Amino acid sequence: MTTTRATAKGRLALGKPKIANGRRKIGSTRPKLKPESESKRKSKTEPVPSSKTEPNKPRTIMTITTRSVPSVPKGKQKRFYLLDKCYYSHLDFPTYQKKVNELGWYQTTDVKKADMVISSYWKHLLKYSMMKNKKLLLWTHEPYHDWHNRLIEPIGNGNQKVHVLNVYTPAPNKVFNDNYRYFRWGSRDQMLLLSPIKKAGYKYSDPAVFAKNKLPLLALSTKYAPAYYQGNKATLLPVRYEIIEWGLKNNKARVWGRNWDKAVVSGNSRGDGNREQSKAEILGNGYFNIALENTSAPHYVSEKIWEAIVSYCLPIYWSNATIYEAGCMPQNSFIDARLVYQKYGRAKGAKKIYEIISQMSHAEYIERMNRCIIAFNSIARRNVNRGLLTGAKNHQLHIVDYSRNWASFRRHFR
């Protein structure tokens, strides 16, 4: 295991730990996962139901075929059909494909022969709501692909039902079982430890420099149209936009991202395509990062808070129901926007956050930032991504171990 220690002095190098044994750097493209030697993948073009926002284009469906498993007689094998790729589900990884096969399930490209139809989108399943002899399963880790919050939901005329696994469903259908799904800095192959801010020596520990440069706040965010998130009661996008827009209006914030007015946006948050490196360079020029999630749900903690800490930016974050769990983040570490909004209300919440930062002393900043760093290092040392079964490396953002919620996925293939 390679341990890399990042310091406040070398902030622009953050996010690029040393790579052991020729492993890929952060931000490198997703590796092509090769099947087991006895497995073969075939591709077939299947049409996907159209919608107003998504053209009716064919998708390439990956067919999983493996050798027959003796414990499952051929006559008892079942078939599932994928309406879309179900990216980052267990079916996206060879190891779990094999496990599904061992349970007696195989993928088919003929929906008529399928015992179960799977999709990441409710609208795709609507077409099959009249087929009573097929099980319908929805899986997604994206908070806006689906926001049903019950394990089983009626669809169509109500005669058919969908089994749901998403960000909002409770156990035993949980997609996120802990706060570390996107924590990619602690594993068997690589670890990043951060150095606490010292009292003197670096610009982050210089009171005069801090007082002069703690504003503007920095934000990296796509600006979505209201139609994208309206109807989702757990959405945090309107609050995030309020905080950013108040700062832009009062010259106390800068934003990078898509769909913002050209008169206010500072640039593309993804730079030349290396998202992690571009973000580290942007956050390297400030002290505070507006890092609210897209939604609030138990154990839904994305890379936003972790990448802010790695870049020595104190996160402005909306706490969910689990972020303060033992072993995760302590109280009085990040600036909790939820507590600010609860105390001062929606009308004054955004303005109050800027007032809190304007009045924050250098000593409080160091104390809060060091609490974040200590918590980050503790999580990294616990090796929270141990036992990787996906073939992915820890430093790849989206391809992270799913073994912790395999039981939730497996139960639908009995």
Image (tube, rainbow, N blue to C red):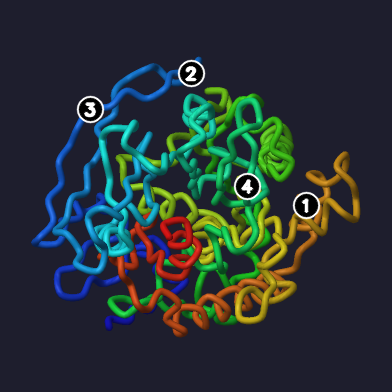
Q: Nearer the viewer, mark 3 or mark 1?
A: 3
Q: Earlier in the sequence, mark 2 or mark 4?
A: 2
Disc 4 residue crowd, few under 14, some 14–19, many 20+, Cα 10 Å: some
List the residue tagged with mark 2. Answer: 51
Q: Nearer the viewer, residue 16 or 233?
A: 233
Looking at numbered disc 1 in the image, what kind of residue is underneath it? Ile
Give the mark nearer the N terminus: 2 vs 1: 2
Sequence-first disc among 4 and 1: 4
Closer to us: 25 or 139: 139
Q: Quadrant of the C terminus?
A: bottom left
Q: Could you tell me residue 212's position as x and y percent?
A: 65, 56
Callout 2 secondary element: loop
Given the image, on which type of amino acid does mark 4 rest? Ile
Instruction: Categorize mark 3 by other alpha carbons within 10 Å: few (<14), some (14-19), many (20+).
Output: few
Tell me the residue that label 3 is attached to: 45
SS for dot 3:
strand
Depth check: give the residue in front, 347 or 133. 133
Image x and y of residue 348, in percent: 87, 43
Between marks 2 and 4, how big is the CA–CA gap?
A: 24 Å
Q: Is residue 392 left or right of 313 when viewed as pictured?
A: left
- Disc 3 from disc 2: Cα separation: 18 Å
Where residue 334 sits, quadrant-wise, is bottom right
Residue 68 left/right relative to 246: left
Answer with the quarter of the image where residue 105 lies. bottom left
For label 1, the residue is 353
